[in-house]
Image: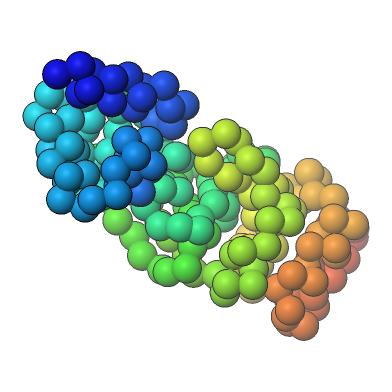
Amino acid sequence: MKSAKRAIGKLFQSPKTILTNEDLALILSENNRDNLKAKISYYIKTKALIRLTRGVFAKSRDYEARELATSLYSPAYISFETALREAGLIFQHYDTIFVASRRSKTMMVDKQVITFRKLKDPVLYNPAGIANRGSYSLATAERAFLDTLYLFPDYYFDDLGPIDWDKCFDLVKIYGNRQLVYRLTKYQKKYAGS
């Protein structure tokens, strides 16, 4: 009983609001899969953890939705419309959380819609233009702008004022895509002319 209480204490000392099987194995120092499974089942029964989806748990209902979105697949970071809206480049509100990942998929987890959009590994693994927000990573305005242009060549942006064009021209190199450089130049000229 004391060891179970100690383990629950360890869980709640973690600053994360979302925990995966891998996180729990590390926190609980448990290498044996069967033992880990049994411990997780116990924590769910005792309501120390809430199962959100297979292999992903919350410590309470008051969890960070963006942390959930980036915990489902790794590597992943918040980008596209979610980051664009936060940066003021688009005005449309979306309840969906948009995530850059290794796969394309839309799913609902605990009433939260999450859309994953696939980026190639050299882009996805490059940390340039990605800010660490503690429990999740978020694309800067420039990175989200380029991620979006990369997948959607004619995307409409409401306001390109927040964009630092020099940063964009530095970041565009990570995509290794001449068409994206052309699109970026076109958008910059269009913005400068407006």
Figure check: 130 above or below 148:
above
Horizontal and vertical percent position of residue 150: 64, 71
Q: Is residue 177 visible?
A: yes
Which residue is at 80% across, 78% downward? 182
Image coordinates for residue 193, horizontal then vertical, percent: 90, 60
Drawn side of residue 103 relative to residue 48, left or right? right
Q: Position of residue 15 (x, y in %)?
A: 47, 26
- Left or right: 143 with respect to 46? right
Q: How many marks?
A: 0
Q: How is the image coloured?
A: rainbow
In the image, residue 112 sits, relative to residue 176, either above or below, namely above
Give the position of the C terminus as an image quadrant. bottom right
Q: Is the residue 186 above or below the residue 127 in the image?
A: below
Residue farthest along the bottom direction in this orientation: 178
Apparent side of residue 136 relative to residue 19 in the rendered image (left or right): right
Which image quarter is the N terminus in?
top left
Please report the residue visible at 41 percent of the width from the left and 48 percent of the height from the top.
71
Classify residue 149 by image quadrant: bottom right
- Kindly tell me whether residue 18 is visible in this rendering: no
Residue at screen point 59% across, 64% down: 124
Q: Residue at x 29, y 43 (%)?
A: 30
Give 120 or 164, whichever is nearer the viewer.
120
